[in-house]
Image (spheres, coloured by chain):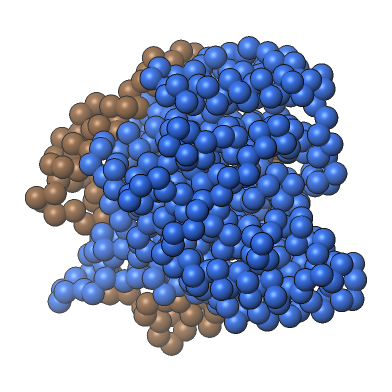
Amino acid sequence: MSIDIDTARKVAKLARIRVEEADLPALAGELSGILGFMEQLTEVDVTGIEPMVSVTPMRLARRADVVTDGGYPAAILANAPDAREGFFAVPKVVE
Amino acid sequence: MTPNEMTIAAARDALRKGDLTAVDLTMACLTAMDAGDGLNAFVHKTPEMALEQARAADGRLAAGAAPAMCGIPLGIKDLFCTKGVASQAGSRILAGFRPEYESTVTAKLFGAGAVMLGKLNMDEFAMGSSNETSCYGPAVNPWKVDDRKLTPGGSSGGSAAAVAADLCLAATGTDTGGSIRQPAAFTGIVGIKPTYGRVSRWGIVAFASSLDQAGPMTKSVRDAAIFLAAMAGHDPKDSTSSTLAVPDFEAALTGDIRGQRVGIPREYRMDGMPDEVEALWARGIAMMKDAGAQIVDISLPHTKYALPAYYVIAPAEASSNLARYDGVRYGHRAKLAAGDGITEMYEKTRAEGFGKEVQRRIMVGTYVLSAGFYDAYYNRARRVRALIKRDFDQVFAEGIDAILTPATPSSAFGLGEMANVDPVEMYLNDVFTVTVNLAGLPGIALPVGQDAKGLPMGLQLIGRPWDEAGLLNHAYVLERAAGYVAKAEKWW
């Protein structure tokens, strides 16, 4: 599978990573190389094999659906690049 | 011998007997750490905290019945969140991040009285095999054979360099595709990746959640047994953490493997494998045989598909895990231009904050999870993963107790030497280790010899799920037979 420049641009957009137009051809080439390496997987007969969900045969632990933690907004906000009045602050989301 | 050169076991015994104080031991390590700046292993030092912990440890030791890790100075990989101490995962995007909480592993270690000297260098978000993707610049291997600086491996490169150079007694590492075992092999130390679920992942910055496990990096197999016991155990905060009891790993080191069946997988004999790797493996097999083990040729037929499956699954999980670095809750936020909205903030922040390899893996993961490709790549890789695990299940069901393989395809290479190769070339470093993560098994790398240049070379033993005790005992036998004692000559 070869990745073209349009696909590389789309993937960067989906990943929310800004890639300059001039860098897209190199990115497309690198992604193509890596995906080419993965093409070997098509050689494997996987008929009747379920995709692995959990590597250990264990049921995930359950607990009652109740609040068990919280009540410290200052600690939650302590590392925020921009926190104001008890909230995370971000640029305008809608006009 | 200065105290920083001690093993955990020797220091524990000396501390308990009162021949050594935790403060003196910690001071020796702090001195070695400061003298070791040329290795770029420690990236955030915490000497005041270390001395405070050491004084507390001396109090506990004096009172008697202190745990084995009490007063033992450790280095902690930068991937572990440590309360109030920089925890950056080797990334610019977490610049300035000081967690408000403590990872379960470090909390358990501190609870047992261990001392933290500082945080250790690593590949960014644990993505790399040479420590060269770190935002701090690469850690350097204490081993060298000429003017070149060599890689300590990755991603736990700082941990490996610090232990091999005696800057600390031992260090924590994490292993998603070989990140404990490959650097251990490159630096002549011991590193164990436990069974998936043995050690809590809570508070460890996530890379690929179905593959990540933390483990100890130490100077001996006995130290690995002592250290692992202090890290392991059930944690309700990690839903994949096992409720199985943690055995006494040190007590399992009987040195007796007579009648045990050690499998030698034919698929690990790769084309183009260096003769020295082949010869080391043959020597390891002979040592296990001499110790009374029964050597059995086995087949793990899907081995060659492990790397491509891993490089679908790990980036897919990483793309999801790393979505949280958005410039809102912690870490770096890009400076915005007039009129930039939230999308520009995300895109600029992530372009500035993530290095090239991390960006590449996020985008590969995004692609294989995107509509139209999910089945062809991600689901196929998960099916192949099930087959890789089935290969191991079958040989264990046939009575194999442990599997012996090479740890790495070569000894340590020069920093910068792989800079211009295809990313896939670098990925080949994980060829012998990655199967173990995909199958969730315990694996240990230990030094067995040196190559013609004089660099350490390791072998890997793979164990049955949850049988770290048996695995460590096999490793203990191999360690004693190999008699590896070489240390890097100090140049730093």
* Residue under the image location 33 percent in, 51 percent down: B147
**Residue B94 as seen in the image, left or right of residue B109:** left
Q: Position of residue B263 (x, y in %)?
A: 66, 19
**Residue A43 as seen in the image, left or right of residue B301:** left
In the image, residue B283 above or below residue B85: above
Where does the N terminus of chain B fall, quadrant-wise? bottom right
In the image, residue B390 above or below residue B164: above
Q: Nearer the viewer, residue B106 or B273?
A: B273
Q: Which chain is blue?
A: B
List the single residue furthest toward the right: B64
The colour chain A appears in is brown
List the single residue furthest toward the bottom: A85
Q: Is residue B212 visible?
A: no
Q: Is residue B35 visible?
A: yes
Q: Position of residue A17 (x, y in %)?
A: 26, 55
Q: Position of residue B455 (x, y in %)?
A: 47, 40
* Residue under the image location 70 percent in, 75 percent down: B24
Where does the C terminus of chain B fall, quadrant-wise? bottom left
* Residue under the image location 63 percent in, 75 percent down: B27
